[in-house]
Image: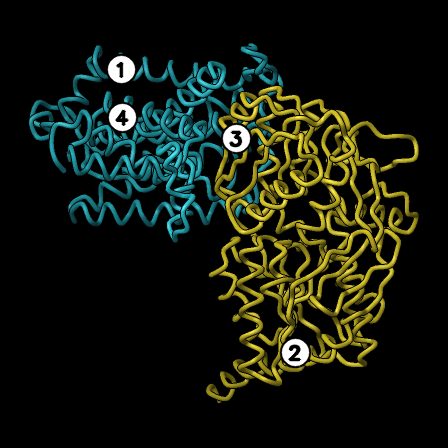
Amino acid sequence: MRKLTLAIAVIAPMLGHAASAEDTVKIGYIDPLSGGGASVGEGGLKTFQYLADELNAKGGILGHKVEIVPLDNKTNPQESLVQAQKAIDAGVHYITQGNGSSVGAALSDFVTKNNTRNPGKEVLYFNYAAVDPSLTNEKCSYWHFRWDASSDIKMEALTNYMKDTASIKKVYLINQDYSFGQSVRTDARKMLGAKRPDIQIVGDELHPLLKITDFSPYIAKIKASGADSVVTGNWGQDIALLLKAAADAGLKVNWYTYYAGGAGGPTAIKQTGLDHQVFQITEGFANSGNQAAMDYEKAFRAKVNLSLWYPRAVNEMRMFKAAAEKAKSIDPVKVAAALEDLKFEVLDGGQGLMRKDDHQFFQPIYISSFGKLAANEPFDEESTGWGWHLVSKIDTPQAMVPTTCKMVRP
Amino acid sequence: MLELIVISTLNGVLFGMLLFLLSSGLTVIFSMMGVLNFAHASFYMLGAFFGFQLTKWIGFWPALVLAPLLVGAIGMAVERYGLRNTHKHGHVAELLLTFGLAFAIEEIVSMIWGRSPLDYRVPALLDFPAFTIFSTNYPAYKIFMLAVSIVIFVALLIVLKRTRVGLIVQAALTHPHMVGHLGHNVGRVFMVVFGVGSALAGLAGVIAGPALVTQSDMAAALGPILFVVIVFGGLGSLPGAFIASLVIGLVQTFAVALNGSLASAFGPLDPSTGPSVLTDIWNVTIAQVAPIVPYMLLVLILIVRPMGLMGTRES
């Protein structure tokens, strides 16, 4: 009798588990939930959980409930593979990741190998923020889809804007020392050199990724170089602490950034007192002027108590649903085929396209600056009273770049 | 250039003094008990988190006093109920105890406060630029950190060198049995020293928390550097730890400020222009290797002078 009870106690939960696994679409969220990237990773997790709840409230994807499985990779490629394997073993067919292109490259490679070795058990990798261009060029994979604009698209747009700003004379580059940071610096050098040969690059810094706790020495160096503008791809605590150190030292320059709006960034910018002198480039932002997006932002802030930092995550999840409905299946192979060349109305308005050639999503891109708000701009950031203001919008056709990807199709 | 040197020196001295606050406790504990306390950086982290929490409840200034006292009390409890019991099983057991403790503290801290950085702000009273040199502001809070570190250093020196308590502590360092025979309670001396050492680490945490980042991996990030400091300065030597802290603080800050690479040292004969698999190595700048410089110093000093700068024995 006792053995029987024990057996039931052990087996019963397994049965329940198997039944529910059949019904839900599990999305493995592999991102830092500890260490230097944690603030970004936790924000992303809350966003995806909000999106999953939203889908589930409307009946899920083809009647399947969507579940986000959080997995902590500590921003470490090796750890990410361990977590990805764990996810696959737990019945996950879709993984999503964004923080760290080094992680992105490792995951893309891992998923590709996994799918070659285990036909019938394919896994798709939805990349919402790892922007190293190589992921959709020389290292492209059929199983990888990217919703964020790649680094070269962003730099192209940013330098187009800088080109017309005559006051820029001396530029300082500071970036994180890994694949993404290096691609930012190379692109910036190349594009600025071509578009504005008169601009002098007075500094080109690479620092360790997410390890620096005090940027004062770097700020002292920027100051000494006499730069009037800084270009940086830093994200997570690396941008927040960089701006904080700049605020402490009273460094007055223009900042051209990819991610100044990340956690802690707005607070630090307000502290620097640089009104509309910090620029960022994104695929959408709170005060974009698009009514649907602004209503969405309002609902999101009310529920999650964060700004919507990832409009691309909204696009990703909605497109996932659209592709599944088009394919009439949640089978990863069919969803992947349906995603190719799928056109989609993005959150902030305008049509986007998941290009078949390289699985890069192209969408309108915005340059915005941070400072005092105008009357029609309702959203501030981190209770600073300051918010993002539209500076320039680049439509989808102008935001497209060529690819060298030679896609290997299954 | 002058501006860069002045600011870097200030930053370097500041970081060095912070290292000293931490390493002073560690090195005194080592010289007394022969135990390398792996959990020392964890006490620093506890200080920062207690400081954050108490600041929220009762304000920064009471927290500045209370948080180190709390950490000190925890340190004493660890010595009294942990280390004293394992002492009879030898140094390895003690080492393992502190090693385990470091992990336990990290996990407990992340259980209570989570793993993401806390919003631990500089108190409003000190949130202004203290002075401006060459148009660069220097934050008042950093001057405050510097002042606290110097006060502690002077106080520690006076207590150890000029008071009766210091006399007993110093005697217990080298001749614990003789001190015991003279009627002093050596066990209590150990406990108090361990407590004071932990409290100093806690104090460093409280003041460094708002300036740096308060999160659950801050102990792991700083721990290795502490060992570099005390080995470099000479195990158990307080002046050694002081010099080593400053040297490492300055070296790390200046390494960031310098631009040169190995290749540029050759001037027109720059070897990186030729096609070579070594191009990347030639072009690595000093700033990029800044984080590993302290560890290179550690290796060097162990080869050249194993007892450290001011150390008296090899161990």
Q: Residue A195 placed where, x, y %? A: 71, 39
Which chain contains the residue that carries disc 1? B
Observer-side mark, 4 or 2, equals 2
Inspect the image, locate mark 4, and give the three-letter code of the amino acid beneath it. Answer: Ala
Q: Residue A27 placed where, x, y %? A: 66, 68
Which type of secondary structure does the marked residue at label 4 adopt?
Answer: helix
Which type of secondary structure does the marked residue at label 1 adopt?
Answer: helix
Q: Which quarter of the figure is the C terminus of chain B placed in?
A: top left
| Residue drawn at point x = 76 percent, y = 66 percent | A355
Marks 1 & 3, CB-CB < 8 Å contact: no
Q: Residue B21 placed where, x, y %? A: 36, 25
Whole-number angstrom distance, CA of label 2 to CA of label 3: 45 Å
Whole-number angstrom distance, CA of label 4 to CA of label 1: 12 Å
Whole-number angstrom distance, CA of label 4 to CA of label 2: 61 Å
Q: Which residue is mark 4?
A: B241
Q: Which residue is mark 1?
A: B157
Whole-number angstrom distance, CA of label 1 to CA of label 3: 32 Å
Which type of secondary structure does the marked residue at label 3 adopt?
Answer: loop
Q: Which residue is mark 2?
A: A409
* Chain (yellow): A
Q: Which residue is mark 3?
A: A215
Observer-side mark, 2 or 3, equals 2
Circle 3 residues within 10 Å: few <14, some 14–19, many ≥20: many
Which chain contains the residue that carries disc 4? B
| Residue drawn at point x = 85 percent, y = 46 percent | A298
Circle 1 residues within 10 Å: few <14, some 14–19, many ≥20: some
Q: Is residue A259 visible?
A: no
Inspect the image, locate mark 3, and give the three-letter code of the amino acid beneath it. Answer: Phe
Q: On the same chain: label 1 and label 3?
A: no
* Chain (cyan): B
